[in-house]
Image (tube, rainbow, N blue to C red):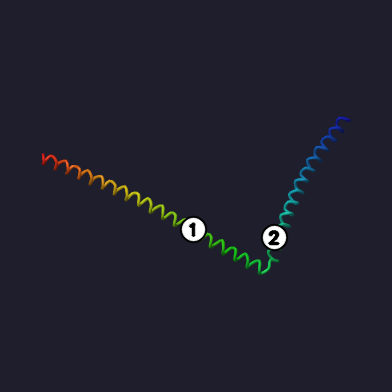
């Protein structure tokens, strides 16, 4: 009988501890949800109480950021075009160098043939 009573007390304490843990996690979730809702409400309230000057300064800052973005895009495109122009220039220079070497070798052959004819 004493063993049954001890077993019931042990089982009861285990169940109550596990239920308390569940209640704590549920309470924590409810508290987290409440804090989130309060923060959202405060943010909405701050936006609704903003003055016209705040909106105008925000609009000017956004316009300034947009103009900076356009400048960066322009400079990026310009840099890309300059790099491509350099690549094309170096290819043309390489071809010109090949043509020059070919002309110099032809000239050298003509000179050597001329010297052979003279001898």
Q: Is residue 49 above or below residue 39?
A: below
Q: Position of residue 34 (x, y in %)?
A: 74, 54
Q: Position of residue 67 (x, y in %)?
A: 53, 63
Confirm or deny contact between disc 1 and disc 2 (CB under 8 A).
no
* Residue under the image location 89 percent in, 30 percent down: 2
Label for residue 104?
none
Q: Position of residue 44 (x, y in %)?
A: 69, 62
Q: Position of residue 95 (x, y in %)?
A: 29, 48
**Element type where label 2 sits in the image:** helix
**Residue 42 sits in quarter:** bottom right
Please, which residue is most extreme toward the right here?
2
- Quarter the C terminus occupies: top left
50 left or right of 67? right
Label for residue 43?
2
86 left or right of 27? left
* Residue under the image location 71 percent in, 54 percent down: 36
Please, which residue is most extreme toward the front here?
119
Q: Is residue 102 above or below residue 8?
A: below
Identify residue for label 1: 73
Please, which residue is most extreme toward the bottom here?
52
Q: Nearer the viewer, residue 52 or 41?
A: 52
Q: Nearer the viewer, residue 7 or 26?
A: 26
Crowd rating for badge 1 (residues with CA inside 10 Å; few <14, some 14–19, many 20+):
few
Foreground label between 1 and 2: 1
9 left or right of 97? right
* Residue under the image location 83 percent in, 34 percent down: 10
Q: Nearer the viewer, residue 59 or 19?
A: 59
Number of marks in picture: 2
- Quarter the N terminus occupies: top right
**Element type where label 1 sits in the image:** helix
Crowd rating for badge 2 (residues with CA inside 10 Å; few <14, some 14–19, many 20+):
few
**N-term-proximal mark, 1 vs 2:** 2
């Amino acid at each position: 009988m004493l063993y049954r009573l001890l077993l019931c007390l042990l089982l009861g304490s285990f169940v109550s501890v596990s239920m308390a843990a569940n209640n704590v996690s549920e309470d924590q979730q409810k508290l987290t949800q409440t804090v989130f809702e309060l923060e959202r409400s405060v943010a909405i309230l701050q936006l609704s109480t903003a003055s016209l000057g705040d909106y105008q300064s925000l609009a000017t800052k956004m316009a300034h950021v947009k103009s900076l973005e356009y400048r960066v895009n322009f400079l990026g495109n310009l840099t890309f075009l300059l790099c491509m122009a350099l690549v094309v220039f170096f290819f043309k220079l390489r071809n010109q160098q090949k043509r020059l070497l070919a002309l110099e070798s032809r000239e050298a052959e003509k000179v050597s043939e001329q010297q052979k004819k003279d001898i």
